[in-house]
Amino acid sequence: MIRLEVMPDHESASQRVADLIADQVQRNPVSVLGLATGGTPERTYAILSERVCSGALSLSQITTFNLDEYVGLSAEHPQSYHAYMRRHLFDVTDVRLEKTHLPDGAAVETGGHSGSRVCEAYERLIDEAGGIDWQLLGLGSNGHIGFNEPGSAGDSVTRIVELAEATIEANSRYFDSPDEVPRQAVTMGIGSIMNAKRIVLIATGAGKVNAVQQAVRGPMTPDLPASFLQRHPDVTFILDEAAASEL
Ligand code: GLP
């Protein structure tokens, strides 16, 4: 059962997610957080960093694991998710960089075994940290979570994936041209995500309305990867009215 919270707009949804993260960290300062990128959680991260800067919150003891990273982009590339996380959270709060983790997309070469080594190493690091206590997710308009595109199995683990055309197009807004968007990514699998103790997904705006409707009300199917969340025991969708309008 997916719990639903519908907020009036993106700002109040972002405030709600920031409150939930702050609450988790205040209850357990050494929490292991699973983090997401994309346009949607940017405001949530901004609210968290305001709270850290004002002294109302400390993130200094958390460990973090991000969902995904593009294959072939170095951590310094401005559109890498490494750079995104530094810009929006790690460099503007007291998060300790050595406690943060993202898949090493730059270490994956085409052909050879480097890809599986990177993926296995990432799964192992999550295990060694004791698993993820609290996982934040965004939602692709095609129903992807992380970079688990339609066709992903419910028990998939961290692996190299081909990006869907729709995702390349959606994410090309951050690059100079669609040709520059990497075609592959390393992503935690749906099975890896489902191992988190608690999951919170944020989706706002009319562009997410179909994906939200199918994830919540549709059948559990690889065609709509977020639908697998229905079988997680503790998952909440934080939506704005636009994204929830077909529920
Ligand atoms: C990206 C990320 C996802 C994110 C999604 C939605 O491709 N890999 O983790 O949730 O697409 O992004 P946005 O929030 O910009 O709509």
Image (spheres, rainbow, N blue to C red):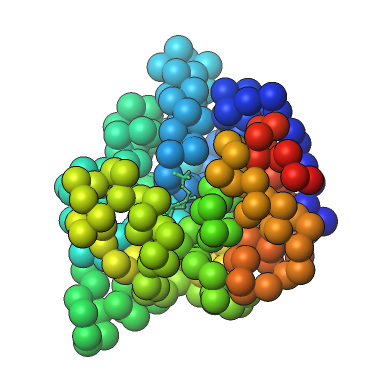
What's the residue at 70%, 58% (across, down)?
214
* Left or right of 224 on screen, residue 57: left
What's the residue at 30%, 50% (across, down)?
172
Whether residue 245 is visible: yes
Image coordinates for residue 67, horizontal then vertical, percent: 45, 57
Give the farthest residue toward the right. 1
What's the residue at 62%, 74% (across, down)?
222
Image coordinates for residue 40, horizontal then vertical, percent: 49, 38
Question: Which of these two is toward me, 79 or 247?
Answer: 247
Image coordinates for residue 158, horizontal then vertical, percent: 45, 71
Question: Which of these two is toward me, 210 or 95?
Answer: 210
Give the farthest residue toward the top. 54
Question: Which of these two is toward me, 174 or 53?
Answer: 174
Image coordinates for residue 20, horizontal then vertical, percent: 64, 33
In this view, 179 is above or below 24: below
In this view, 139 is above or below 142: above
What's the residue at 58%, 36% (across, down)?
205
In this view, 50 is above or below 94: above
